[in-house]
Image (tube, coloured by chain):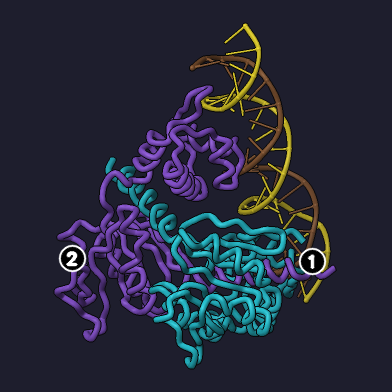
Chain colours: A purple, B cyan, C brown, D yellow
DNA sequence: TAGATTGTTAATCGATTAACAATC
DNA sequence: TAGATTGTTAATCGATTAACAATC
């Protein structure tokens, strides 16, 4: 099974397009339609599906419901995913209550910080002292954590998470964190995203200026 | 000049590594060191540099200061980048005050919403009615906008931005928005990022379980 | 000079796409 | 059946890497 990050990202996008198409009343879908919706080729769609042994009907295309279910299974959405957040600044609190996560079966079960002023033990999604993270992670069998602390403390936080047994980290701190064989780290770097956009906009303006 | 998105992203990462190395007291740097810092090969580093005619010294490597300056010029960081935000929910307000942007010479000059309760005309970074966006964009010569509205209104918002003359959009709404020849749209999809992580963590756990 | 590192070319690797036989 | 779409293979494309001559 030859997968890569881009392929899995496309799977997510197919899924979200499928929900939309379903809500529009579609029951079956062809690789061509899905390709249009996600802006890839239909070859790409069929290739991605074949990697995961998703098969359709040689003239009737794919049943949307089956497709959604299969993709959800592949993406591990058949069970509720419990996630913790470390760092309750502005970005951290925004993500704590981000409606898109709940909708996708992803539940932020707790957040952690070192600032006592931020602690909220009795909220539905509590904010707890960072030192309680290891115990919480073990007791609740948490696998995934989101880092929204400043770059300067991100590396320390990762160490704590690793030793607590976290297996996956989504890092928003603007510093390249390294995973190891036991833990996957994905970095989302907002400055880099914006810088990238700025670059291509400048290219656009220059080439149009001619 | 053969560039692509990944190449430009690496440039951003080189830059941030260089600032760190500089603060550590380094003055010169070899492609090997930078490769380690960003987790790529040294061939990759030299190749990326050669694309932009960045040259070093055949035995002394690259001068950090020169390198930073050249990368900043390429990325358009030689001038202040003015950016607007559309959608002042939790995520929008978090990004409005995100310290990483200011640090990088990116200034959020205003935010827009349709909810009158959110308007703040007198703040340093004002929150204005969405209908004032076109005028504001033209008067202040804004090129870049960030979308943090719900998926359902994202497409409408894009239309408004396009006709106002925005050239680049960073979209956080969980829906694939399309650009056109006059406008570059980059999508940051937080659910997709997290789903991706969940997938690879599950793979990790399964393979380790053996 | 000898040694180390760049800059660049050619080789490799991997992902995307085109094409088409199979078949519903 | 005829026509349309899948599933898969082979071709293409593009990005990464290895290797090494040039040279500081």
Residue nearer the viewer, A80 or B199: A80
Instruction: Report in which chain the residue with disc 1 lies.
Output: A
Which percent across, then down, holds residue C23? 52, 15
Q: Where's the C terminus of chain A, which quadrant?
A: bottom right
Q: Residue at coordinates 45% horizontally, 87% vertically from top-left? A: B120
Neighbour tally class for label 1: few under 14, some 14-19, many 20 plus, Cα within 10 Å: few
For disc 1, the marked residue is: A208
Instruction: Report in which chain the residue with disc 2 lies.
Output: A
C7, above or below A65, in the image = below
Residue B62 lies in what quarter of the image? bottom right
Label 2 vs label 1, nearer the camera: 1
Residue nearer the viewer, B73 or C1: B73
In this rendering, does residue B144 appear at all? yes
Which percent across, then down, holds residue A95? 35, 68
A12, above or below A63, in the image = below
For disc 2, the marked residue is: A136
Q: Which mark is residue B204?
A: none
Which percent across, then down, holds residue B23? 52, 85
């Amino acid at each position: 099974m030859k997968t890569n990050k881009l392929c899995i990202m496309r799977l997510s996008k197919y899924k979200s397009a499928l929900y939309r198409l379903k809500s529009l009343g579609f029951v079956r879908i062809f690789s061509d339609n899905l390709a249009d919706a996600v802006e890839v080729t239909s070859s790409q769609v069929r290739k991605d599906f074949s990697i995961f042994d998703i098969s359709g009907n040689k003239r009737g295309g794919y049943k949307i419901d089956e497709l959604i279910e299969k993709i959800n299974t592949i993406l591990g959405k058949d069970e509720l995913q419990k996630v913790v957040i470390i760092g309750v600044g502005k970005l951290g609190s925004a993500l704590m209550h981000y409606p898109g996560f709940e909708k996708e079966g992803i539940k932020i079960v707790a957040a952690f910080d070192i600032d006592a002023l931020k602690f909220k033990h009795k909220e539905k999604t509590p904010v707890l002292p960072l030192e309680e993270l290891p115990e919480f992670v073990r007791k609740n069998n948490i696998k995934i954590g989101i880092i929204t602390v400043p770059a300067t403390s991100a590396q320390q936080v990762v160490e704590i998470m690793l030793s607590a047994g976290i297996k996956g980290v989504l890092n928003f701190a603007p510093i390249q964190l390294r995973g190891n064989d036991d833990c996957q780290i994905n970095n989302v770097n907002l400055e880099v995203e914006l810088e990238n956009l700025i670059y291509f906009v400048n290219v656009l303006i220059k080439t149009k200026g001619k």
